[in-house]
């Protein structure tokens, strides 16, 4: 997927007037596609990039978008594309947090929360990272808790996990799909919506995902997990075989 192609258009479900595709951008040696939108709870900015355009990772280190520790951690991944996805996610996260906070990227460190979710130090806002195949996406906000998930739909859906992952109502809806393509689309829509929501609340899969119904569409889920807070879910439409959802919690 050529994310820098000027003919490519990103779009989003919901209040389309609040979404802005910022086009191809460059920060130091990092090339990415930027976007922003207004959720019900605040402005969210995002960036999406391809590992095909990552270039020399040592240049990202020299310009402060990744640090020596992350270069070392990258080597724990055996596959080159896994290494590149890890580094690209960190570089994009620093790019967005630098833009929203005014702090220099080289001053921002990432440390795990008590639940293992990466957070910035010093604290300069909320962010979340996801990747699949060649794409890496990061979203950030000064105040809104966020979760994002992207999945490459060309991969064979792991239908065998459906019963442990999907709510009974979701299983019935997927069973009603008329053919393999529609089942594949439904599966990845549910998977990305649910994982984005679980990441936004910071619990990951410590909550039984099959106990949560998100369905395959709609923007807002109320009283999720008996929380008084509201969850907003948006679909980010990408040209190409990707499913992507972004969740925000007030």
Image (cartoon, helix red, strand yellow):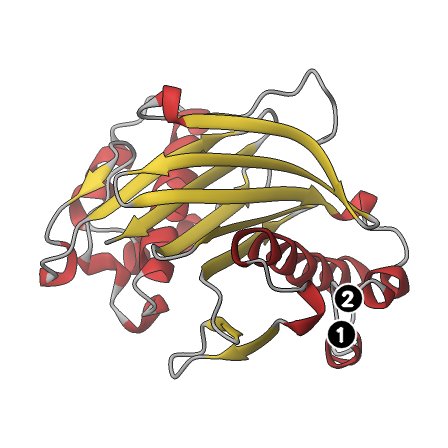
Badges 2 and 1: C-beta atoms under 8 Å apart?
yes
- Separation (CA) of disc 2 from disc 1: 7 Å
Q: Residue at x 36, y 35 (%)?
A: 38
Q: Is residue 33 above or below residue 80?
A: above
Q: Residue furthest front?
A: 102
Q: Quadrant of residue 171?
A: top left
Q: Nearer the viewer, residue 207 or 159?
A: 207
* Residue 156 in sight in this render: no
Q: Residue at x 85, y 61 (%)?
A: 57
Label 1 secondary element: loop
Q: Nearer the viewer, residue 12 or 95?
A: 95
For residue 84, side relative to residue 137 (left or right): right
According to the picture, the residue beneath numbered tag 2 turns out to be 64
Label 2 secondary element: loop
According to the picture, the residue beneath numbered tag 1 turns out to be 67
For residue 17, side relative to residue 22 (left or right): left
Q: Residue 107 in the image: state x and y as whole percent.
A: 66, 73
Q: Quadrant of residue 19?
A: top left
Q: Quadrant of the C terminus?
A: bottom left
């Amino acid at each position: 997927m050529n994310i820098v192609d000027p003919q490519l258009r990103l779009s989003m479900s919901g209040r389309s007037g609040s979404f802005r595709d910022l086009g191809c951008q460059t920060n130091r040696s990092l090339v990415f596609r930027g976007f922003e939108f207004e959720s019900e709870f605040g402005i969210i900015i995002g960036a999406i990039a391809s590992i095909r355009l990552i270039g020399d990772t040592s240049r990202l280190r020299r310009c402060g978008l990744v640090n020596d520790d992350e270069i070392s951690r990258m080597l724990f991944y055996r596959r080159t594309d896994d290494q590149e996805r890890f580094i690209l996610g960190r570089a994009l996260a620093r790019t967005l947090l630098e833009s929203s906070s005014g702090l220099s990227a080289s001053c921002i460190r990432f440390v795990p929360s008590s639940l293992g979710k990466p957070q910035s130090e010093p604290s300069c806002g909320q962010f979340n990272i996801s990747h699949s195949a060649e794409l890496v996406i990061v979203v950030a906000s000064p105040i809104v808790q966020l979760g994002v998930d992207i999945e490459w739909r060309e991969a064979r859906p792991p239908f065998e996990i459906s019963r442990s992952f999907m709510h009974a109502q979701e299983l019935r809806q997927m069973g009603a799909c008329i053919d393999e393509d529609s089942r594949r689309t439904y599966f990845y829509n549910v998977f990305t919506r649910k994982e984005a929501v679980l990441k936004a609340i910071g619990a990951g899969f410590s909550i039984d995902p099959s106990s949560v119904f998100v369905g395959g569409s709609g923007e807002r889920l109320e009283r999720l997990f008996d929380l008084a807070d509201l969850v907003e879910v948006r679909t980010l439409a990408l040209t190409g075989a990707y499913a992507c959802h972004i969740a925000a919690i007030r």
